[in-house]
Amino acid sequence: MTTIAFIGLGNMGGPMAANLVGAGYTVNVYDLVPDVVATLAQRGARAASSPQDAVRGADVAITMLPAGKHVSGLYLGEDGTGGLLQALDDHCLVLDCSTIDGETVQRLASACTERGLDMLDAPVSGGVAAAQKGTLTFMCGGTEEAYRRAESILCAMGKNIFLAGGHGAGQVTKMCNNMLLAIQMIGTSEALQMGANSGLDPKVLSEIMLKSSGRNWALELYNPFPGVMDSPASRNYTPGFMVDLMSKDLGLATANARATGSKIPLGEQAEALYRKKQQQGDGRKDFSSILELLSD
Ligand code: NAD
């Protein structure tokens, strides 16, 4: 029987851990917030009293934390030494599903290699609804062998599982995807708002563009104009996927572009627009609320 330690039971981690329990795994759960640990325990997980307690005897350690500093603080320790990695069993597979920066992934991967542990970066796409339904997309970076070990566990939480390349490739894939998503969302918002300003019904305009060459994911499944479909826009931009998280992801993308000499003028513009939305105090709104910048 595989035992999994799951650390970070927030909007995403909570339902992901619940799906692992539902699939029959023994799941030791830990979070800084005791209430979310208790909720998972009611659903059949084992409540751990500390990260060290969670990983005791675990075959796999999964983390779903806000950002790179939380991941490195946990595994490597605040000063870069003596974190949770030291407490893992020798055969334990490390699966970090958080969205984090490339530098932290490389530091964690090197520390795992030194310690003789397999590790995958395995960020996700799909949001809270997909986490609940177990239909996430996982974008993995690491060795083929680690990927094979992780596959059945990831399948209990997701529908589409990919190995993108070596360590860090999962995070780069996630950055590329979310930069494209942000650009699509802004472009879709511009088209819909200009249509509305010109007297068109955004619902009719959306229907026509969906059968034309402007068709895209944001228009089809996540329309940013209120009242067009059952999307966050029609619920006062309740997330969904927050402006704060999209800004974080665009920050990771622009940092990666600088590091790799990539030219991303639209990605930079997208980051500037999302940062502006944050500065307006809208960080916790859904990211489709970027349309409000155009309609104000
Ligand atoms: P969240 O803030 O809801 O949850 C994070 C959890 O981690 C919290 O419960 C917090 O208490 C816990 N935590 C923080 N530091 C900890 C520590 N040292 N030990 C134990 N627990 C700790 O965030 P979320 O929305 O679940 O997102 C998690 C990750 O998934 C982020 O990296 C995010 O970018 C990514 N992501 C989120 C979405 C989304 O739609 N929310 C979609 C895809 C990817």
Image: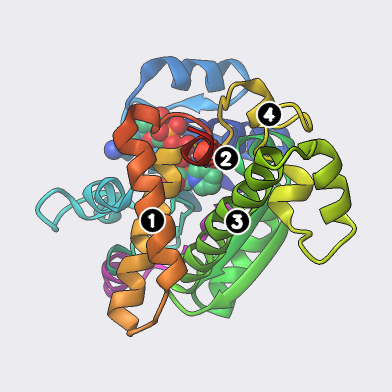
Q: Sequence-wise, which precedes: disc 4 or disc 2?
A: 4
Q: Is residue 85 left or right of residue 153?
A: left
**Element at label 1:** helix
**Element at label 3:** helix
Q: Which residue is mark 2?
A: 288
Q: Which residue shows up at 61% across the image and 32% down it?
A: 15
Is the residue under label 1 in contact with that under label 4 (CB below 8 Å)?
no
> Residue 253, can we see it?
yes
- Residue 115 is inside the magenta segment: yes
Is the residue under label 1 in contact with that under label 3 (CB below 8 Å)?
no
Q: Which residue shows up at 53% across the image and 34% down it?
A: 286
Q: Which residue shows up at 90% across the image and 58% down it?
A: 211
> Residue 56, can we see it?
no
Point out which mark residue 226 bears. 4
Q: Which residue shows up at 76% across the image and 44% down it?
A: 221
Query: The residue under label 1 is which amino acid type?
Result: Glu
Query: The residue under label 3 is which amino acid type?
Result: Gly
Q: Which residue is mark 3?
A: 187
Is the residue under label 2 in contact with that under label 4 (CB below 8 Å)?
no
